[in-house]
Image (cartoon, rainbow, N blue to C red):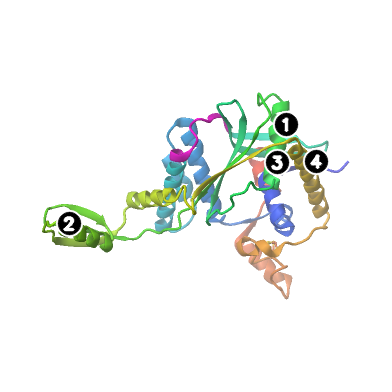
Amino acid sequence: MPPRLTVTQSEMRTFMECPHKWRLAYETRLSPHVDGFALTFGTAFHHGIHTMRSNGVPDYDGIQRIIDEHPRPDPSNRAAYSKCRAMVRAYDFLRDRNAKEHASELEFAYAFNRVNRLRGKIDLIAEKDDGSLWIVDYKTTTEQYTERVVPPLDIQACAYVWAGFKMHEAGALPRPPHGIRYEVIQKPTIRPKQVTATVFNTGYEIVGTKKDANDYLKTHRADGRPVEITTQETREETDEEYEARCLDWILEDLDGENPRYVTIERVFDAADLKTAEMQLRNLFAAIRRAQRGEYHVNTTHCRFCPFSRVCEWVNHFDDTETRDALIESAFLIRPERNPELAIEGEAA
Ligand code: SF4
């Protein structure tokens, strides 16, 4: 009997991106000294959404703590904090209030067969007015999300479909899931800027760009009122002003051509469960083969791969010493195969 294998959703995602990346992360057990900031940002955003849904108010201190724990220079952390707050506020503003929360951050762990097990977490199970249960997946994106058609079932969605039906079988859900709802929000690409505080002879102050001040002057002079600038001062935008601008940016074109918040729903049908089972079976088999050294390399993800500096497929090392020295300087070698399972006390 082969040894038992427990696979998590993030491990599956890594494998689908590049099996060699999976080998470096889970077989060689390399862990970057410092995780990428995108991971930290995603954790902070999910924490904000989860606490907002459970307590009615997002835990902004918690968001800040998660961001501050990442060793980046302070100014960029502050901008990231404002962006994250704006995204959580936008989400709170736009979410479907008719859908009740059935469960949030719902963890699952089920045997796929006698030797393979799947663990993961569902962001939210929402219940609509008609009683249907939906698996909700929050996604953050750095680029404009232009996909308007229902996406095909990727491996993560397969895990959700399969786990959702298992939960129903086990009595954890009163009904099988009706479908999956993706809620995609774009991370603001605008940066903090300098603003000009302008004081007029009326004593009125506006904060904005020079253009705002000139527009104001044009309008009010056109009204026949004498308006003159008495002082003008340029300073850094405050965190609150930047956050407000990020929120406006997200909400700007919701019903237009370039929305920055998109929801897409896919209703499950009987074929989806079969497809999910087949894809998961194939994935477990591919991981077992990769453990024996039979795998392919996918170089389309190299640009954002944390292992690109030490990957022998993209670097032509003359000797292994150079590579080992690079690994030693940038990576830890973990004792456990999967850190998520180690936290849960299940280091299989
Ligand atoms: S650098 Fe490219 S080929 Fe190497 S592990 Fe990463 S994604 Fe795979």
Question: In this rendering, is residue 106 above or below 278?
Answer: above
Quadrant, the C terminus: top right
Q: Earlier in the sequence, mark 1 or mark 2?
A: 1
Q: Is residue 261 left or right of residue 211?
A: right
Q: Position of residue 124 (x, y in %)?
A: 58, 35
Is 97 magenta? The answer is: yes
Residue 38 found in image quarter: bottom right
The residue identified by callout 2 is 220
Badge 3 marks a residue whose secondary structure is helix
Q: Identify the magenta region.
A: 92-104
Q: Earlier in the sequence, mark 1 or mark 3?
A: 3
The residue identified by callout 3 is 159
The residue type indicated by label 4 comes to Arg
Question: In this rendering, is residue 241 above or below 232?
Answer: above
The residue type indicated by label 1 comes to Lys
Q: In the image, which is nearer the foreground, mark 4 or mark 1?
A: 1
Badge 4 marks a residue whose secondary structure is loop
